[in-house]
Image (spheres, rainbow, N blue to C red):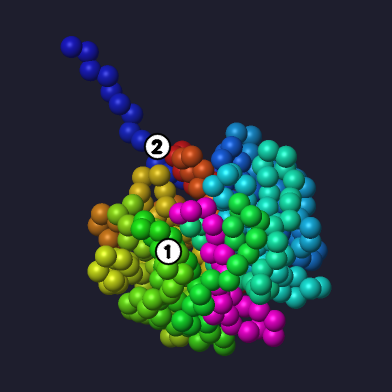
Amino acid sequence: MLLTAVAPAAAAQWSAAGRLLSSREFHPATALPDGRVLVSGGFSFSGILASAELFDPATRRWQNTFPMSFGRFAHTSTLLTDGRALVVGGANLDEGYVAAAEVFDPATEAWQPAGRLRRARANHTASLLADGRVLVAGGLARRHTELRSAEIYDPMTNTWSDAASMRFARFHHTATTLPDGRVLVTGGDRGEDDFQRSAEIYDPARNRWTRAASLRRARGNHSATLLPDGRVLVAGGGARTPGFTKGAEAYHAPTNRWQRVANMNAERAFHVAVLLPNGSVLVAGGFADTGTVRGAEIFSPATGRWRRTVPLRRARGHASVALLRDRALVAGGGLVSGKIVPTAELYGPG
């Protein structure tokens, strides 16, 4: 009997993914159904960007597409069930906080109006609900007011409607759609780096928020990732003391409890986090007391532990991340010095 040797799987690594046509930070990235990735808006030394561009993983090249109606940063971009991307809110130096929303159609690469938020906002969250609607919650508004309000976009009617308000005002928080269709909101800032431990859950069937168990540690500018087993992993972020944290914890919805998991190897906030195809979580980059972070690490849900992986090719915070078929794309971002990083890179099999 002839035995055929099987080569071991290639170790994951970072590889170059070209240069963005416009350097940007505070921008979102959205993986489209055709495999391309859309990035839109953001902050640049040339101003607040209206431009948008597409990354093609087959060629590893970026190309410009039609711009949005006006510039914005600290906005959200959500993939709708019909394959379009909904861009909501943000900030603009000319108009202040933005109420307008628009939708990108990958088939035509055109932007179409998607109504106006009832309250202009930035640094909010946007969550796709099971019925195809989008929940927008919290954020900052005019005169730097922290918001409790929430609203819902219905793509079938292209309209916005009020949702019940959260129990607490917050921005730089996270929102995660749970397997049962509810949305978990965690932490965030109340202004002046007053980070909070509170968490709450939105039930779209009842249009109601209920208190969830509080985080074990107050934090904002952290990440939250839905794990394959239904738990939500919260990692890093800004904290009252010492300023940044490497702490992590996991929320178990059936018991309404936060579980201890191992700390990350490095403190970080404003980092990227993404669930990889193998069920582990990649965390990379960000900011810390020591400056801009280049390191990356992997969380294993099976062991509850972190391990270091190869660092980014370029340190960066305020970057965007999107999951492709077998690898993660990290694009743009900035440094503590204020310099904007123009490159992108891919994490995946060598």
Type of amino acid under label 2: Ala
Query: Which residue is the site of mark 1?
Result: 205
Q: Where residue 301 sits in the image (x, y, percent)?
A: 30, 56
Where is residue 33, by image quadrant? top right
Is residue 340 positioned above or below 243 on the image? above
Q: Where residue 19 sits in the image (x, y, percent)?
A: 68, 48
Q: Single out the residue that lies furthest toward the left.
A: 1
The magenta segment = 130-152
Q: Nearer the viewer, residue 256 or 30?
A: 256
Is 144 inside the magenta-drawn segment? yes
CA distance separating discs 2 and 1: 45 Å
Residue 320 tag number:
none
Q: Nearer the viewer, residue 209 or 172?
A: 209
| Mark 2 surroundings within 10 Å by alpha-carbon count, few (fewer than 14), some (14 through 19), many (20 or more) | few
Is residue 311 positioned above or below 5 on the image? below
Residue 10 tag number:
2
